[in-house]
Image (tube, grey):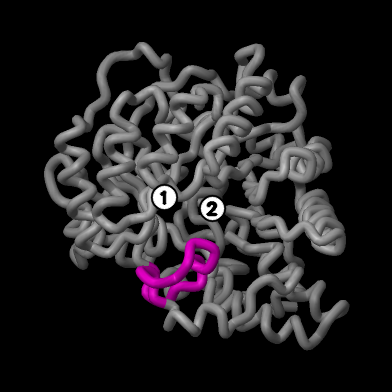
């Protein structure tokens, strides 16, 4: 996760994170990525069921009427007890579509009562006025609503007509209750031209935050590898996101803009800052070192709908245990597992360009799921890294 607005527009200084000693339990949400202890933000895909049929769904979700969920309300509370005691600062309720579970608000309330921050990732279509009031009442920190572009493109991605209008209504209902709401957008060739529309929506609807996700080759998204942007197109996209962010900032609109799942964005932003503002570039480099790059298996973890524990929500072909059999805290801390402890020190294991890269300490080898999907090797270089050999210092 690269905070474009934080880094490029100077919204965060290194001293901001140091003031809280970079402790994940003390840092405000917008500084959490700069924590030193990297206690995991836990994504819980609480259901595989969904009311939409998105073409790029990493969970390969099922129909919302497709049976019962594996983890009961009572068992979920035991899981939350363990996570809170372990020090996980945030629980992200996801799916499928988390709002198809009737106990979402009850479990979100339980997480906040235990001292965790609770957020949800949703398609937004089920957030009625009543549901928004419920979510506000349980002290939910944030609602992330996924959009894929304007109405025509979004509804085509979601495979259900009317999804776009219902998502916008969900945003409006959240805002009416004072809930912090933001947008999530996954970039690929089918919707790259929609990015300016998303920035316009952020302005027009007064939305405070937007996250642009680079494509990860998993779930249904694995079928879209050929539709990922090439390296030149990715560079142009990151430049566009920086330009649009700066334009908003210059108008006095201090929105939070982030890119997610390609940590080459950090060095790329820093190199641009070196040309535009060398003094700020030094601060950016320090913040990028705090950030430490990809955090799969360290600063982020995932519990699937069936209780299986993964390094992140996209990378499901490696399972480290199951919370229905053993607490997450024990699984996450088990030194006898092979891959999970290695992910906590990726720099020792990555190969190819990643192993020689001068930015390894601020990228951490980028996304292992993409490397494995393309090369069949967990430790191969990430094929989506768009930095040149000259830029990374190996030629």
- Going 36% across and 42% down the picture, which residue do you hit? 138
- Earlier along the polypeptide chain: callout 1 or callout 2? 1
Task: Specify the quadrant that holds the C terminus.
Answer: bottom right
- Going 54% across and 63% down the picture, which residue do you hit? 30
Residue 301 in view:
no
**Residue 62's image quarter?**
top left
Q: Identify the element where label 1 is drawn.
A: loop
User: Spatial distance from mark 1 to mark 2, Cα to Cα?
Assistant: 15 Å
Determine which residue is flagged by label 1. 312
Closest to the observer: 99 or 66?
99
Q: Identify the element where label 2 is drawn.
A: helix
Closest to the observer: 171 or 241?
171
Closest to the observer: 4 or 111?
111
Q: Is residue 32 magenta?
A: yes
Task: Specify the quadrant that holds the N terminus.
Answer: bottom right
Closest to the observer: 138 or 247?
138
Q: Position of residue 305 (x, y in %)?
A: 31, 33
367, above or below 172, in the image: below
155, above or below 387, in the image: above
Can you tell which of label 1 and label 2 is closer to the viewer? Answer: 1
Crowding near the residue tagged with mark 2, few <14, some 14–19, many ≥20 C-alpha atoms within 10 Å: many
Q: Is residue 238 left or right of residue 159?
A: right
Q: Is residue 93 left or right of residue 192?
A: left
Q: Position of residue 51 (x, y in %)?
A: 48, 17
Crowding near the residue tagged with mark 1, few <14, some 14–19, many ≥20 C-alpha atoms within 10 Å: many
Determine which residue is flagged by label 2. 371
- Going 52% across and 59% down the picture, which residue do you hit? 380
In magenta, the rendered stretch is: 23-38
């Amino acid at each position: 996760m690269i905070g474009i607005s934080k880094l490029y527009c100077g919204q965060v200084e290194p001293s901001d994170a140091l003031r809280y000693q970079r402790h994940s339990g003390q840092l405000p949400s917008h500084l959490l990525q700069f924590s030193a202890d990297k206690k995991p933000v836990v994504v819980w895909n609480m259901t595989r069921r969904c009311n939409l049929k998105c073409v790029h769904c990493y969970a390969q979700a099922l129909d919302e009427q497709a049976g019962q969920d594996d983890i009961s309300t009572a068992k979920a509370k035991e899981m939350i007890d363990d996570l809170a005691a372990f020090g996980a600062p945030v629980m992200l309720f996801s799916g499928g579509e988390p709002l198809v579970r009737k106990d979402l608000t009850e479990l979100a309330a339980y997480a906040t009562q235990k001292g965790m921050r609770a957020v949800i990732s949703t398609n937004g279509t089920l957030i009625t006025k009543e549901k928004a009031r419920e979510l506000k009442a349980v002290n939910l920190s944030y609602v992330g609503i996924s959009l894929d572009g304007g109405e025509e493109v979004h509804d085509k991605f979601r495979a259900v007509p009317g999804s776009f209008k219902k998502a916008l209504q969900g945003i409006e209902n959240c805002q009416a209750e004072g809930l912090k709401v933001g947008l999530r957008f996954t970039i690929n060739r089918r919707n790259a031209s929609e990015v300016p529309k998303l920035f316009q929506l952020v302005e027009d609807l007064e939305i405070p935050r937007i996250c642009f996700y680079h494509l990860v080759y998993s779930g249904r998204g694995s079928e879209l590898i050929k539709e990922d942007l090439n390296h030149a197109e990715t560079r142009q996209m990151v430049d566009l996101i920086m330009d649009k962010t700066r334009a908003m900032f210059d108008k006095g609109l201090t929105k939070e803009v982030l890119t997610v799942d390609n940590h080459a964005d950090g060095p790329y932003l820093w190199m641009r800052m070196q040309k535009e503002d060398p003094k700020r570039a030094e601060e950016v480099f320090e913040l990028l070192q705090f950030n430490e790059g990809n955090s799969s298996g360290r600063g982020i973890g995932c519990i699937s709908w069936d209780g299986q524990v993964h390094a992140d929500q996209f990378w499901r072909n490696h399972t480290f245990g199951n919370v229905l059999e053993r607490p997450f805290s024990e699984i996450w801390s088990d030194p006898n597992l092979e891959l999970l402890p290695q992910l906590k020190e990726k720099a020792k294991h990555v190969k190819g360009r990643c192993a020689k890269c001068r930015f390894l300490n601020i990228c951490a080898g980028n996304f292992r799921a993409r490397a494995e999907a393309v090369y069949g090797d967990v430790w191969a270089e990430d094929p989506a890294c768009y930095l040149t050999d000259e830029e990374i210092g190996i030629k």
